[in-house]
Image (spheres, rainbow, N blue to C red):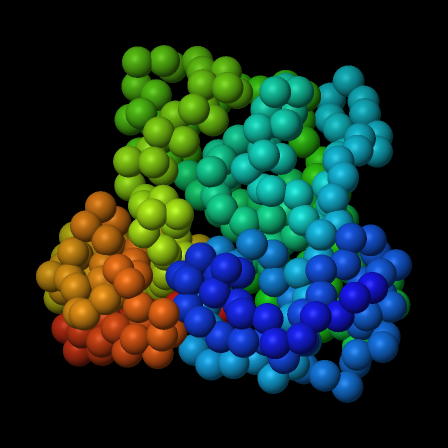
Amino acid sequence: MKILQNIQLLPYNSFRTKAVAKLFAAPETTAELSDILNSYNDNEILIIGKGNDLFFTKDFEGLVIKPEIKGIRVLNETTDHVDIEAGAAEDWDEFVQFCVEKGFSGIENLSLIPGTVGASPVQNIGAYGAEVGNVISVVHTLDKETGAPKIFNNAECGFGYRNSVFKRTCKYVITSVVFRLEKSFKYIEKYADLNHELQNNPTPDLDQVREAVIRIRQRKLPDTATLPNAGSFFKNPVLSEDEKLALLRILPEAPMFVVGDQKYKTSAAYLIDKAGLKGKREGMVGIFEGHSLVIVNYGTENGLDIVRFMNGVQKSVYDLFGVRLEPEVWIY
């Protein structure tokens, strides 16, 4: 397996910020990946997929690994469900399309989310009332320090809101993911925007749900190819009972969703809107006019410009509403 040196990382992050990786590798098999991890474990290691959820602020003085492990196969099939495994480097939306075309349901609401299959468990990606952790049965990984294989069942993944054991520990490299999907489908109303999009079709099929999700996302979100961004930049804040009451005293109509015992999720986009920041621009960085959760790059190659803008948004929202916004993206 060839290890490259001094590789420019601008093409490998959707914000298109410049940084140089001291070492870079793109293994195509689990065996190659295991050998690299075992041989270079004295280096700092960063695993990337398509780079849609990260950006760089400085050079990376270690080894960047971009696994290229692909393949889709059905492991088991009954009259009710199917267990299907996909390699970590498979494009996420192409995998969703493959499943929808086969009539396998469970991830159609996650259409058009950028990234790879391997990234989906890390963030526990979610949209329109669905989270990928609800349909993942097994995650195959390698230990980042030793290259040894380790398999996680669903409970061991520790899925939470935009979180998992893989994100919390950064100890494992995902090589493939097994999903249990249903072979029947009935649309259940979960999310207002999607319900509105389908209001003239009360019994949509899988294809129609996927198409509706794609239409919504294309209206709201900029294409990273023309306007570099990382999708939703901030997590929706989770508040305690006291924090919820304090926010409602300032913003009585702030949306609140129960997510646990005296835990409430509110909308980061709503707070950014109410802070008057939607469409705000400073230099070459700004908030997209079509969606308040999306920070966009209008031309800088310096990741610190994005960090400075992020800090300003966080400060404005906290000063006004007492809520701290936490970034969803990875910053290096």
Q: Is residue 126 visible?
A: yes
Asked where in the image residue 128 lies, by quadrant, the reply is top left
Residue, x 71% and y 66% (percent of image)? 25
Q: Closest to the observer: 276 or 286?
A: 286
Examine the rendered structure and indicate whether residue 7 appears above or below residue 214.
Answer: below
Q: Nearer the viewer, residue 55 or 216?
A: 55
Q: Is residue 176 left or right of residue 313?
A: right
Residue 162 as seen in the image, left or right of residue 148: left
Q: Residue at x 59, y 71 (%)?
A: 7
Q: Position of residue 16 (x, y in %)?
A: 42, 62
Up/down of 320 relative to 68, above or below: below
Q: Observer-nearest residue: 242 or 10?
A: 10
**Percent position (x, y) of residue 6?**
61, 76
- Image quarter for residue 201? top left
Residue 37 is situated, as x and y percent measured from the top left of the image, at: 80, 72
How many numbered dots are placed on residues in this image? Answer: 0
Of the pair 197 and 63, the residue shown nearer to us: 63
Quarter of the figure with the N terminus: bottom right
Vertical side of 3 occupied by 141: above or below? above
Asked if one can make out residue 232 in the rendered structure from this viewpoint, the answer is no
Horizontally, residue 209 falls left or right of residue 295, namely right
Residue 199: % across, % down = 30, 19
Q: Residue at x 82, y 53 (%)?
A: 29
Name the residue at 53% across, 45% down: 131
- Hey, which quadrant is residue 322 in on the image? bottom left
